[in-house]
Amino acid sequence: QTSRDKMLEVDGTIDSSEVNELVTLSRKRKYQPTDGKKVGVHQGAHYFTRGQRKGLAVGGTPEPLFVIETDVNTNTIYVGQGKQHPGLYRRGLFVTAAETHWIREDLEIAVGETLEVMARIRYRQTLEPATLHRTEDGLYVIFNDEQSAISPGQFVAWYQDNDCLGSGVIA
């Protein structure tokens, strides 16, 4: 039994100690130039998105390369080999309170509450089971299974019974 299961068993609410786990599950990985080696040059990190495979102009690897992170401040693109590279996946994401939009305001959860939903981060993506966790700062969406290439600026939408309850911009 995971701590997430225990958290949901208590009474459907979350406390400050459990927020740490939510932050960990939704934090993007941080890469440093020392984590790998230089394999090419590019015209600007802002032209690339997490999960991108095409247009990297780098070859000679056993498996295709995918963008796993970009850093526009240092103009660095981090790539990983293969579609299953762990840098492409994580279970959670965060939407700030200002970027959270409820279509079904009657079903909006209060701070400290959780809600089981189906969610997606891409248009036409299969709906995936997830849990919403509302905090003072915003909304954590924790998927049951890891999701590929969650990126800031993308939208996440959550549903119940094929009814869209709300959406938000990923922080």
Image: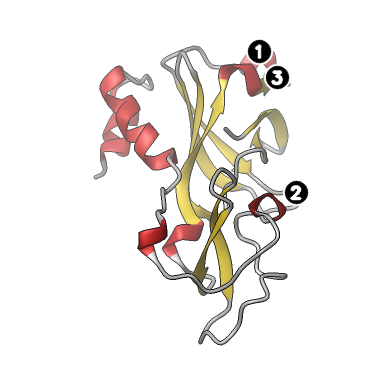
The percent coordinates of residue 142 (x first, y second) are 46, 39
Q: Residue at x 63, y 22 (%)?
A: 100
Question: Could you say which is closer to the camera, residue 27 or residue 100?
Answer: 27
Q: Are circles 3 and 1 on residues that touch, CB within 8 Å?
A: yes
* Residue at the disc numbered 3: 104
The percent coordinates of residue 126 (x first, y second) are 66, 54
Image quadrant occupied by the C terminus? top right
Q: Residue at x 68, y 49 (%)?
A: 46
First-in-chain label (2 vs 1): 1
Image quadrant occupied by the N terminus? top left
The percent coordinates of residue 170 (x first, y second) are 60, 35
* Residue at the disc numbered 2: 123
* CA gap, disc 2 and disc 1: 25 Å
Q: Residue at x 62, y 77 (%)?
A: 58
Near mark 3 (Cα within 10 A), the count class, few <14, some 14-19 or many ≥20, is few
* Residue at the disc numbered 1: 106
User: So how many labels did they put on this image?
Assistant: 3
